[in-house]
Amino acid sequence: MIKRLGSLCLMVCAGVALTNTYAHAASPIPIHFAPGSYGAVVNGHVSASHWLQTFKLKATAGQVMTLTFAGAVGPMRGQVQCQGGVAGGPYYGNGDSITITTAGECDITVGGNTMAEPQPGTFTLAVLVYTPAKSP
């Protein structure tokens, strides 16, 4: 009985700890493109307690998203998650391109590479979203 009670307490405590961890996560920062442009550059900051920062933008099916980032936070990494299960990453600073298959929001997460002891600092994220020309 005491062993079961101990196991139950452990599960409840772990659930509370996870709830508190996710309850304090920052909301994604929206990325807006200037009228007529297909790209944006945004700056972010990571710290020892918040080593990731998430941005969001809207994309249309068939568009291609290209991203890259660099900063003063030591080794970095990032990833993209879009509607319809389209995802890319992890990227380690040099970025990549993905084709959007379902219209909707995409989350772009950038931050310190935790596998390489991230350091606090600022970074710059560049994002291009364009519709490729159709072949004749």
Image: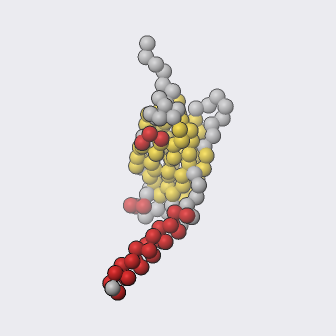
Number of disc labels: 0
Q: Farthest residue to the bottom: give it.
A: 2
**Depth check: 123 or 55 in front?**
55
Question: Which residue occupies 42% across, 42% down?
Answer: 85
Does residue 121 appear in the picture of this structure? Answer: no
Task: Look at the image and tell me in which quarter the C terminus lies.
Answer: top left
Task: Look at the image and tell me in which quarter the N terminus lies.
Answer: bottom left
Q: Please, is residue 95 above or below residue 135 in the view?
A: below
Does residue 56 appear left or right of residue 85 in this picture? right
Q: Farthest residue to the top: give it.
A: 136
Question: Which residue occupies 59% across, 39% down?
Answer: 40
Task: Give coordinates of residue 84: x percent, y percent.
Answer: 44, 39
Does residue 7 appear in the picture of this structure? Answer: yes
Question: Which residue occupies 46% across, 54% down?
Answer: 76
Task: Give coordinates of residue 98: x percent, y percent.
Answer: 43, 37
The colouring scheme, among rainbow, by chain, secondary structure or one colour, is secondary structure
Q: Please, is residue 93 above or below residue 136 in the view?
A: below
Task: Give coordinates of residue 13: x percent, y percent.
Answer: 45, 75
Task: Give coordinates of residue 25: x percent, y percent.
Answer: 55, 61
Question: Which residue occupies 52% across, 63% down?
Answer: 22
Q: Farthest residue to the front: give it.
A: 1
**Depth check: 133 or 17 in front?**
17
Does residue 117 appear left or right of residue 44 in this picture? left
